[in-house]
Amino acid sequence: MTPKFSPMFLLVVASLLFSACLPIVTAPSDAATLPATVASAPTEQPITPEPLPTEKPASKVPALPMESVTYENAEINLLMDLPATWAIGESMVIGDRATQTVMSSPDNSTTVNLLVNLWEPHNDLAAYVEVRQTAWEASGFTVLSSEEWILDNGQAVRVFIVETTDQKRTFFLLTPLDDRYLTLAGEGDLELVEQIALTLRFVSE
C-alpha cells in the first residue's frame, strides 16, 4: 500500500531538500541579521461538488427483440414482457391451491404457462426443485440443462430444459414466493421463451 503524506509533511521535506542544495555562505560578524522568512499558508481551493445524477440507472432486465407489452399479475406483484401479438388467457383456478395463466403466440406454436401454487415447506427452493426433478424422473423425462439465474431484484430462480419421452423439449423456471411457488413452463421456440423469462421482475407493494 502506498503511504499517504499530509501536505504539511511534503512542504517540510521540500524545504529541507531545497536548503541542502544551497552553497554555504559565512556571513561577516557585523552583517545585519536578516529577518526570518515566514512561510505563507497554502491557499485552499474550493471543491466544486459534482452534480447529482438526474437519470435512474439502467435496468438489468433485457428488452425483447420485438414490439412488446407488459403482463402484470397483481396477486404476486409480478411483471413480465410478452410479444405484442401474443394472446393472454384468463387466470384459471386449479383446485384450492393453484392458479394458472396461459399465454401463446398467434399460431399457438409457442406457449408460456404461469403456475402459482401453495406448497410446503415455504421459501425452500431446493426442496421444491427436488420434488419436481423426482416427478420428471418418474415420468421418464430427461433434464438436459440446469442453471441458476438471479433476477433484477436479486431473487434466485432455477431454470431447466427438460426433454419428454417423445423428444419434446420444455423450458422450466422455478422460484419461491413466500408461501407459494412460481413455475413458468414454455414450449415451442425455447429461445423466445427464455427471452420472455428474463424479463420477469417483482415489484414492491
Image: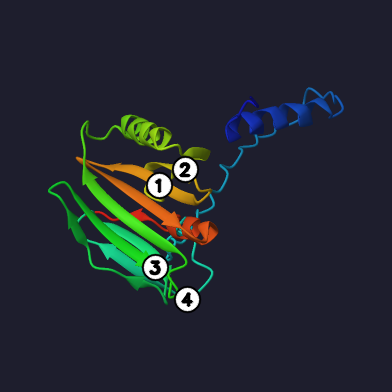
Residue named by callout 3: 104
* Of callouts 2 and 1, the N-terminal one: 2
Q: Quadrant of the C terminus?
A: bottom left
Where is residue 167? Give x, y as percent: 53, 48
Disc 4 or disc 2, which is closer to the eye?
2
Check if mark 4's residue and mark 2's residue have beta carbons within 8 Å: no
Disc 4 or disc 3, which is closer to the eye?
3
* Of callouts 1 and 3, the N-terminal one: 3
* Of callouts 4 and 3, the N-terminal one: 4
Q: Is residue 32 left or right of residue 174?
A: right
Q: Residue at x 50, y 38 (%)?
A: 142
Q: Residue at x 49, y 65 (%)?
A: 63
Q: CA–CA distance between discs 1 and 3? A: 17 Å
Residue 86, placed above or below residue 3: below
Disc 1 or disc 4, which is closer to the eye?
1
User: What type is the residue that disc 3 sits on?
Assistant: Ser
Residue named by callout 1: 173
Q: Is disc 2 surrounded by few (<14), some (14 to 19) or many (20+) residues within 10 Å?
A: some
Q: Residue at x 42, y 56 (%)?
A: 186
Q: Is residue 121 left or right of residue 105?
A: left
